[in-house]
Image (tube, rainbow, N blue to C red):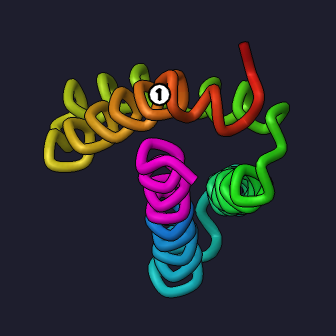
Amino acid sequence: MPITLRTAIVLLFVEAAGVAAVAVLFAYVLVHENPNIMRKSALSVIIYPAGIAVALALLAWLLIRRRAWARAPAIVLQLLLLPIGYYLIVGGAGWLGVPAIVAGLVCTGLLIAPGTRQALGIR
């Protein structure tokens, strides 16, 4: 397995762990702060990050098994980090936004690298 694919897989797992940690943090805040404020919308703020964390981990696992079709959804999720990172920076959380943008760009580059494409059997 080429270093580009290995690094992309590790980065996907790290991102999955980070997003899962955010979901746990949101759950903690929901339970301990004020559980009566917007419970339904706050619950969705927990479910979406948890789902994205599962999707990132699943795509990483599929890439370990060299499933070529998993590359495209992984690239899409990485590119979605760009606007999320931008709005984090604009919203005053640059310490989260800049790493999100960098991770999205680096992982996308690794997933489209010739070594990764060759390892997955993509022309």
Would you call the spot at circle 1 few (<14 residues within 10 Å), some (14-19), or many (20 or more)?
A: many
Residue extending farthest to the bottom is 32
Looking at the image, which is closer to me, 46 or 82? 82
Is 118 colored magenta in this rendering? no
Q: Main secondary structure of the magenta part?
A: helix
**Measuring 45% from the left and 79% from the top, which residue is drawn there?**
33
Q: Considering only vertical position in the picture, is 35 above or below 93?
A: below
Quadrant of the rendered structure where residue 47 is? bottom right
Q: Considering only vertical position in the picture, is 116 above or below 6?
A: above
Specify the quadrant that holds the C terminus.
Answer: top right
Q: Is residue 55 left or right of residue 11?
A: right
Residue extending farthest to the top is 123
Query: Is residue 42 among the parts visible in the rendering?
Result: no
Q: Is residue 21 left or right of residue 50?
A: left
Residue at the disc numbered 1: 108
Q: Considering only vertical position in the picture, is 114 above or below 1?
A: above
**Measuring 40% from the left and 23% from the top, which residue is drawn there?**
82
Residue 5 image position (x, y, % from top left): 53, 46
SS category of the residue bearing label 1 = helix
Amino acid tagged 1 = Thr
Q: Which residues are magenta?
A: 1-15
Looking at the image, which is closer to me, 48 or 118? 118
Q: Is residue 43 left or right of residue 16?
A: right
